[in-house]
Amino acid sequence: MGGLFNSILARVLALTFALLVLTLGVLIAIMQTPVSGRVFDRAIGESANSIAELVWLIETSPPEAEGAILSTYASRSRIAWVEERFANGLAPDRSRHALLTEDATAVSERLRARDIRFDAVGALELARRSGSNPNLFYNSASTLHIAIGLEDGRVLNIWLAPSIIFTEPQYAPYFLLGLVLVITVLLGFALHRVIMRPIRALEHDAERVGLAETAMPVSETGPRELRQLARALNRMRLRLDGLIREREQIMVAIAHDIRTGLTKLRLRTDSKDAVPVAEIEPDLVQMERLLSDMMAYARAENPLAEHELIELRSFVAALAERAPQSIEITHDSAKDPFTIAGSRLAITRMFENLFANARAYGGGWIGLSIARDAEGLAVAVEDNGPGIPETQIDRVFEPFFRGEGSRNAATGGTGLGLGIARAIAHTHGAQIRLSNRPQGGLRAEVHFPAAIAM
């Protein structure tokens, strides 16, 4: 729950709610100040005719109609009831009395000589009074209580809850527009501080991000969404750092191999005797193979060939049957096809690299098993060689890493085969897992998830 309340959405909602509460509180506070007197005076002038008509209806209508008259008069801004006597706290007010009777109509004339008393009721007092009599409950920030003596001795009580917003047509649009502008500006400044401030901090940290090990990462602070973004930027930084180091390693290895080959050629050609082509051909072939593997590795994650539908069971089995060395193929009992969209050239290169690795480092036997379950299709290439030390299983995918500890062409390839295979697998949504077989040898399993099957 702590993470939820620290999200941007929660902050915006909390800020909006707080602003609304603050606005309501300001309006309530204004109604408790002398400003409320002017608002009440305006309300009396606007309601004078309706109050005079209400008095006339109650005094001229039969008693059984009184309840209906009072209910009809009630609205969101006013309520009326009749009591036997004046309540405490009421007092005459000549100016407001004059406002109530200033219209020279026959109806208003009935109020001129009446005993009329007034009282401004604040929010707390209003809650206390309405709480003591639920039938007279009225929800307002401040109310004007008008009590008018009737001809039969009873008292007509009226609560007016005037709006602080101007309701006259000539003023209302401007007042509402001004209120909306004020709230919008306040909300904009608040949102800028709550949201943009951590974003600016994240932007500042991102500008200082470097790829060196000593470089400072992005600070993972602020709302939940920004912390997630900061973590993603830090992960991306680590991946970029790894890619750059890998490319540096590749360039150093390429330079080393090519320099070694050129040195051999120079030593041979510097002699006065003619150099047979057969002597320099292996070095040229090795450099050509190195460059070819380098191009394949660079393109493995972005293959140029268009994807097409490939039924993996039959496709991989056909590759194994065409391999230069005999491969023992094992199928599971299920015969349902497993079709994906991919590059035939790239997938061929991936499995040929796995076959070549088993042939180079295995003990002479190569096995291929194809099995499908609910999670997908698993294609495993196995051998009965010495396997790989557990500490080196993850490293064999690194460019030019050779488990036997040398980079001599006589003991293996260029050291890019498994790296190329893994890159091709990633581009097709698959994964390669290496493990040592209990009976000896290495198992390289390519797992194609069920989600990519067509």
Image (cartoon, helix red, strand yellow):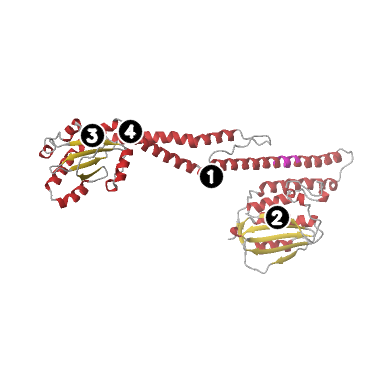
| Disc 4, SS | helix
Instruction: State how far apart marks 4 and 3 are (Cα).
Output: 15 Å
| Precedes in sequence: disc 1 or disc 4 | 1
Q: Which residue position is annotated with label 3?
A: 42
Instruction: Examine the image and state in which quarter residue 112 appears.
Output: top left
| Disc 3, SS | helix
Q: Residue 402, relative to residue 452: is it above or below?
A: above
* Contact check, label 4 and label 3, Cβ < 8 Å: no
| Precedes in sequence: disc 2 or disc 4 | 4
Instruction: Examine the image and state in which quarter residue 311 appears.
Output: bottom right
**Which residue is most to the right?**
273
**Could you tell me what secondary structure mostly forms the magenta stretch?**
helix
Whether residue 23 appears in magenta in the rendering, the answer is no
Disc 2 packing (10 Å; few <14; some 14–19; many ≥20): few
Instruction: State how far apart marks 2 and 4 are (Cα).
Output: 72 Å
* Contact check, label 1 and label 4, Cβ < 8 Å: no
Instruction: State how far apart marks 1 and 2 are (Cα).
Output: 38 Å
Q: Which residue position is annotated with label 1?
A: 2
Going by the numbered disc 2, the residue's amino acid type is Arg
Q: Toward the viewer: 211 or 428?
A: 211
Q: Which residue position is annotated with label 2?
A: 433
Magenta residues (range): 247-252
* Contact check, label 2 and label 4, Cβ < 8 Å: no
Looking at the image, residue 403 sits to the left or right of residue 219; the answer is right
